[in-house]
Amino acid sequence: MKYLQEELKDKLIELLKTDFKLEREEILFTIPPKREFGDLSTTIPFALAKKEKQKPFVIGNRIIELIKDRFDMFSEIKLAGGGFLNFTFKENFLVNYLAANIHRKAPDTGLKMVVEHTSINPNKSAHIGHLRNACLGDTLANALRFLGCELEIQNYLDDTGIQVADVVWGLLYHEGKSLEEIKKIDQLAAYLWYLYPEVSKLFAEDEKAKTGRDEVHKKIEEKINPEYQVSNYIAEEVLKDHIRVMNILGIRYDLLVRESDVIELDFFKDSRTLMETKGVMYPSQDPEKKGCMVIKYEKENIEKIIVRSNGTITYIGKDIAYTLWKVGLFDRDFYYRKFYTYPEDAKEIYISDYTPHTPPGEPYHFGGGESVFNVIDVRQSYLQNIIAQVLAPLSPADHRKKFIHFSYEMVALTPRCVEEMGFELSEEDKKKSYVEVSGRKGIAVKADDLIDKLVEKSLYEVKLRHPEIAEDAAKAIARDIAVGALRYFMIKFNSNSVIAFDFKDALAFEGDTGPYLQYTLVRINSILRKLKEAGESDALEPGELDSTVLDKKEYDIFYDMLLDLSLVELQVELALSQQELSGIANYTYSLCQEFNHFYHLFPIKAEKDIRLKNLRLLLTLVVKAKLERLFSIMGIPIPEKM
RNA sequence: GCGCUCGUAGCUCAAUGGAUAGAGCGUUUGACUACGAAUCAAAAGGUUGGGGGUUCGAAUCCCUCCGGGCGCGCCA
């Protein structure tokens, strides 16, 4: 079932089509700043005025002539402010509409979307920058799911890169450990968190160490032991640690893809054929790039190397091959095996492999998405633009696949935060508003450490408020609050603004924070529970609702909320079309603010007038239903109490 | 050098080219004998970095200057 504004758009286009050419995208519904202007506002007359070369109010009046008396739900359609086309709902239309559609869901689109996120180098623990990636990626996937898409979540594992070789060298030759000894290391990812900066420093200073590392890298590529075994062991162990941390935040994956398998199974062969057939890739005529296969990067009118003169494939080439597989542009496929089982519900994650593990007859349907979303920070924009440009002409003209770089800015640290963690800063860095996170330098906040601090603080707050509560129950609540705080913090900022991380802000539980949202919903649940305990109904009585019984003050607040609540689907759609998930967070926050305001003014349980009580209960139920949907999109858990 | 991006209240940030630029934190003041105070109410706080332009309308688009950040390899 389509939601309200979607139906309105369809009908407007239909009614106006003989007189005006109106695109769907030109119809934007907003809520007017003043109630007397109406309930819903559009700027259609302004948009058409430009095309028709007429005054907005002339166009507006023509539109009104065409559409008046054609809508049952409106009592008035009028022009205001020189060209705003404003609609006013009939008395009680909206309240009854929302009451009838509390649990409505978007219809299935039948479209499969592939979202790749997290994709952390498997050589150390995750840090806060990775948390932003995973929180955005998971929220993106949930938002798409909310709008009726089928989702596949992939996590790409760069197991052939130099970063893994760095720590393999560190363990084998710097620390002189054997594979057996390495296997005995407890919390390997965290161990490597400290080893990685240590060896990175050595590579910068000591040529011999660097040469040793390069040899290790080569041996890994050639599958020579013990380097190869150690590298595999590390990559998988660290990956499991990343999966564990993200699972704490409710972030999960369907498939892990190893770069080594993309290479081993020669996915590039198929993408090469495709690119050459379509003339996208060709031998360079540039003497400096003699013997290289290149593509033309239109934006800068330069050639980018895909195959080096020695026949090896560049990073861009590998990424193009993987991306082509993701959108299903060739038949070649990975082998798969089960890699990890989530302890809570036994759900499996699969991993790619280059040798057969697939039991005969067991079908796999990974890859082949309608659209592919790559959640990667803005520093990869250059590369992602190239991939997008290459991909466009390779998919059939009648069925263009979409490749979307879901870009966001990095998480940095405030100088104060860096100093608090005990690092020395240069005078120059101290003056900066933020310092870039660097796993290589060790200047970073480990995801586990941040989560621990959040849990510790929320546990303290929970015990303060509920001293009677059992330790286990308190801890479970504290975890929910910590997760809510973190996930909200990671998506509330615009994606193209740098988060200057500071513990003070990240640990805030008041105001514009996750716990504020949670508190609103926990209290709603508490009200409904108390109603039930008192033997009253916590569900809505059937029958027509009449909001005219409310006095003016209450009616105004009540009606504003109804209008805002009617925009949920629109807000989620808008966030996706703008690639700006913070809109979902901001919208949810404003709904909570409105409800908290309402709650303080007007009692629900204690109200004696049954008509008032029923209306307030309806509002509470609608807010609850909408908040639950929004929370699940953002991955914010709902604690029992707090 | 070229490309991308940011500059909004003391601080951290919102604002689909729209109607009077909004929140939180902090400051000052008030509200728990109440459906939960992780809450609510109120006050103070703004030349949206400067200048020009486009538009019925600009924080938003264009130009320019100033000040930050990031990216641009036969690395990954």
Image: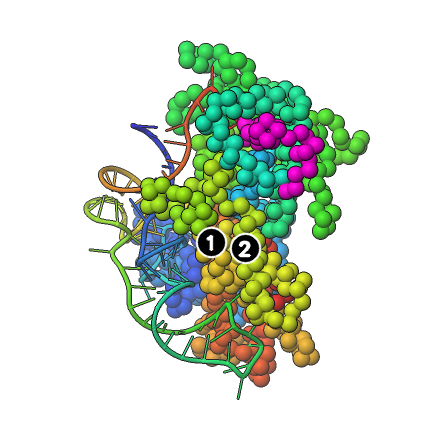
Q: Residue at x 67, y 75 (%)?
A: A532
Residue at the spot of label 1: A503
Q: Residue furthest front?
A: A176
Q: Is residue B49 above or below residue A259?
A: below
Q: Is residue A163 magenta?
A: yes
x and y, in percent, of residue A338 in the image: 73, 37
Which callout, 2 or 1, points at the residue further toward the start of the chain? 2
Badge 1: residue crowd in 10 Å (few <14, some 14–19, many ≥20): some
Percent x, y of residue A24? 47, 48
Residues marked 2 and 1 touching at CB (< 8 Å): yes
Q: In the image, what residue type sits under mark 2?
A: Lys
Front residue of this view, candidates A611 and A26: A611
Dot 1 amino acid type: Phe
Question: Which residue occupies 42% across, 41% down?
Answer: A436
Height in image: A293 above or below A14?
A: above
Local secondary structure at mark 1: helix
The C terminus of chain A is located in which quarter?
A: bottom right
Which residue bears the numbered disc 2? A453
Please provide percent x and percent y for residue A259.
60, 29
Labels 2 and 1 share a subunit: yes
Camera-side residue of A540 and A145: A145
Q: Nearer the viewer, residue B40 or A445?
A: A445
Q: Position of residue A180 (x, y in %)?
A: 70, 32
Look at the numbered disc 2 and give the secondary structure of its residue: helix
Query: Residues in magenta?
Result: A162-187
Chain where mark 1 sits: A
